[in-house]
Structures are given as C-alpha cells and as structure tokens.
Amino acid sequence: MAGFGNPTQAVYSTVRELVENSLDSCDDAQNFPKIDIDIQNLSADTLTVTVSDNGTGVPPEQVPFAFGRVLYGSKYSQQQKRGTFGLGVTMAILYGQITTDSPVVIHTRTETSGGHLYRLLVDVENNLPLVEGKEDSPRADIGTTVSVQLKGDLKRSQERIVEYLRLSTLSTPHAEFTLRIDEDTQLEIGGWSKTIPEPIRPAKPHPRSVDMEVLRRLISKHGERNLEDFLCKSFQKIGKRTASRFLRFMNFSPSRIVSDLNRDELSHLAHALRKYDGFERPDSRCLSPIGKNEFLTATRSVFNVELAEYASLGVNEWQGNPFVMEAVIATGDEFPQSDIPTLFRFVNRVPLLYDASDGILTRALKRVNWSRYNGTTSEPAAIFLHLCSTKIPFKAAGKQSLASIPEIEHSSFQLFRELGRKLGRIKGKSKRSAREMKKMREFSKSLRQIARFGSALAGCDDVPPTDGIVKQLFEVRLDE
Ligand SMILES: Nc1ncnc2c1ncn2[C@@H]1O[C@H](COP(=O)(O)OP(=O)(O)O)[C@@H](O)[C@H]1O
Ligand SMILES: [Mg+2]
C-alpha cells in the first residue's frame, strides 16, 4: 500500500491522487481548473474525502474500470501527465474499502452524457470492479466528483494538505482550489495565471525508450507490417532512411514480418533500439514546462518574495525520454535560514512533499558550493525546481523521490549553479545600486549647498536648480 503507510499519509495521498486526476482531466478539457476538496469528519478516525472538478468527465461505460481496477489507466501515451500507470485513485479507493468497507461514489457527466452516479468496490481477488449501484443522476456541469470514505488522521495531515494545495497553485498557476472541512472553508487559493498552457501533444515512443512491454504493445498494433514499416510507423524520429540504416547495423532484413520474430529476436531488437546512437533526440512538444513568467508570478503570489530569478535548461534526455528542468530561486524571510537554499521539488507539475532528503535532487543541491555565490547564503533562500518528462523515474510506488538517473542529477546540479550565479548577479547589482543611491543623495546635498553659496557670493537672489545636473551625472554613470 505504497503511499498509504499510516493514517496521516493516507488522507494526504487520497487528496493528492484525486486532485492529480482532476488536474489531468482539466488539461484534457483545456480549461481553467476549479477544484473543490471537501472533507467531512464522520467520527474521530473516519472521514470522507470528496473532490469535484470541471474536467472532461468520465464516459459512463468506462467508470467501473477506471475506478474499480488496479493498473487501469488511460495515460499510456508519451506525454507529460501527472498520473503514471493507473496506480493512483484505485489505491485510494482500495485503502478506503479495506479500512471502512464502503464503496467509492462517482458522479460524472461528459459532453455527451447527462450525468451518472456509480457506487463501486474493487473485487480484490480478481482485480475487477464490483458495481453496487448505478443510476442516471443529472448534474449541472461537465466534470467529475469522487467521494472516498476512509480511516485516517485528518488533524495531522491537514497542514500537509494545505501545503500541497498551495504548492500546486505554484506549479499549475491557472488552477483554483477550495478546501472545505466540515463545511468550513479553510483555503481558497490559485488562479495566478490567466492563460491556459499550450495543449500537450502526445508523441510516439522514442526508440531509445523501448522495453519489451512497449515493444509488445506496439506489435499488437502494427505486428503485421515488415520491420522497416513497423519502425517508421511505431516510433518518433525514424523515417525510411534511418530505419534501413539501423536494420543494416543490426543485421535484420527490412522485409521480415514483425509478428514472425521469435522471442530472442525481439529481445535483440529492443536491445539494439536502446543502444543505437543514430537516432535524433526525442521530441519535446509532449512536455509542458511552467514557463518563466508564470513560474515567477506564481512564486511571488504564493510566497513573500524579495528577489526571484528563473532559469531553465533546454531539452535533455534520459533513456530516450525527453526531459526539461526549470527552476526559480527566491529570497525572502518566509524561508528558513540555512547554508543552502530550501528545495521545493515538482515533477510534472506535482509537488513532492515527502522523502526530500532521499532523492538525487537534494543530493545535487548539497553538492553545489553555495558560499561561492554572492548572497545565496547570507539571506534565507529557496529553490523551486520543476522536472517534466514523459516518464518520471520514481524510486518507489509512493511517488515521492527520484531514482538515481545520472542525466537528471547532472542537469539539476547545472541548473542549481546557474541559479546561484543569477542570484549572485542581481544581489551584486542591487548592492551596487544601493551604493550609487547613497552617493547620489550626498552629491545632491553638496551641490545644493554650493549653488546656495555661489548665489550668495554673486549677490543673486535666485538659487539655480541642481537636480537636473545630479540626475544627468548619475544616469550616465549607471549606464556605464
Ligand atoms: N477526475 C477524473 N476525470 C476524468 N477521468 C478520470 C478522473 N479520475 C480518474 N479518471 C480516469 O481514471 C483512470 C485511472 O485513474 P488512476 O488510477 O488515478 O490512474 P492514472 O491517473 O495513473 O492514469 C485515469 O487514467 C482516467 O482515465
Ligand atoms: Mg491518477
């Protein structure tokens, strides 16, 4: 029961899984996400978590499998998504079922269906949905409401949930969240950005990202083709020329029919696809970074920030999966004072709150010699790091920290140093301009006095203005 190890984490994980699905669905609907989280205490240790969204809704015939079967997901395509492989909401539903013996309630409406209400359980032995009740139940708006009853410790998880939602508005700045506990509104937050991110384009898999499972899925679709056609049809970055060069390299006849290949040949093919270095880099249009302006605005909206700088690295690749890293470094009294900036981690726009010390990102952060960068250690600072990729290499199914991937660790190290340099530079600049201001004030005071003395000496009543001279002098100097 990864992520549901104790009653505190269970409540938090339930909220998180439901909210993630809602946000993914709003991405599909291409709208401004408005997500309500309602938590009702039923007794000292039992509660109901209800999350309501304005996403696409779920077609009624898909509801039982989407919610009542472990590892049933609709997100297998190569594109940035919060969900991974259908291990999210069903875990929460199962945990609820095991601890309270209650069904999950789903109320949903799509563009074409008027509204349906389902009550279902998971048949654990067979991994199949058990529909307890199903009725037509009109709802005014398109979207989905999911309600899970579970045993958990709300008191101890409340702070985490609030933190999670606040940080979610930082990584999805066009979303709004309302958190209600026993009818009382605890938090209304978000809507920092007034633009909806560009739609993400699903891509075909990159040949270097292939494993036997992906290969099998592709063969079930295009297995009747010959090898050359199969490669061109199934993968990104393979055209006829690349395909024939690759097949020559691995000694395969281009006209072999793919479904005729035996197990060893398939495994050889998968291996060669991963190793061949003649393929271009993976497509990055299937990624959705937050972007400079949105990221900075959201950081300033959520935290009391004094200085903030953004940096990002271009597209990179780990095992055929494209990834982009971007980050904001900020200073402000709200962050803890420390020798190294406090790290806030985000992957595919999801904030990670647990196991920070465990991962490669924290390791990279600690490797940076922060004292080299002017000012990053003298004042409380924080770094908000966002990694987006078509696949996130989580260390464990709890999805809280990253496994050791050298390319990602190296990139984060580079990005941290770039942030250090940038912050150092603006700190230097603001220190310099403070010095300049002080000089300007002194100059202007002295010049006024000289003007007064000069006028008195010349027997004039009018004292000539000096402000213009000071301005000219300092503008020129600052420009230099
Ligand atoms: N709020 C929602 N709106 C639309 N679809 C949803 C929603 N919640 C769940 N689903 C569907 O149920 C599937 C299973 O969800 P989940 O178990 O969390 O897996 P994942 O998010 O990893 O795909 C999703 O892939 C999606 O198709
Ligand atoms: Mg999910």
Image: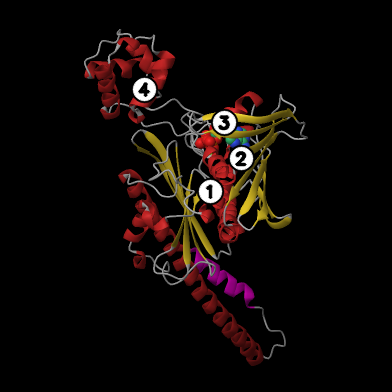
Residue type, label 3: Ala
* Earlier-in-chain disc, 4 versus 1: 1
* Earlier-in-chain disc, 1 versus 2: 1
Q: Distance of mark 4 from mark 3, alpha carbons?
A: 24 Å
Q: Neighbour class for label 1 at 10 Å: few (<14), some, many (≥20)? A: many
Residue 207 drawn above or below residue 54 = above
* Earlier-in-chain disc, 4 versus 2: 2
Q: Is residue 474 magenta?
A: yes
| Residue appearing at x 75%, y 35% in the figure | 141
Q: Distance of mark 3 from mark 2, alpha carbons?
A: 13 Å
Number of the front mark, 4 or 1: 1
Number of the front mark, 3 or 2: 3
Most foreground residue, 467 or 172: 172
| Residue appearing at x 30%, y 24% in the figure | 270
Q: Which mark is residue 13?
A: 1
* Element at label 3: helix
Residue 82 can be seen in this image: no
Residue type, label 2: Ser
Residue 172 percent coordinates (x, y): 58, 46
* Earlier-in-chain disc, 1 versus 3: 1
Residue 393 can be seen in this image: yes
Q: Is mark 2 within 8 Å of ligand 1?
A: yes
Q: Is mark 3 within 8 Å of ligand 1?
A: yes
Q: Is residue 168 magenta?
A: no
Q: Is residue 332 left or right of residue 193?
A: left
Residue 2 position by quadrant: top left
Q: Which residue is mark 3?
A: 66
Segment colored magenta: 466-480
Q: Which residue is mark 4?
A: 215
Q: Which mark is residue 22?
A: 2
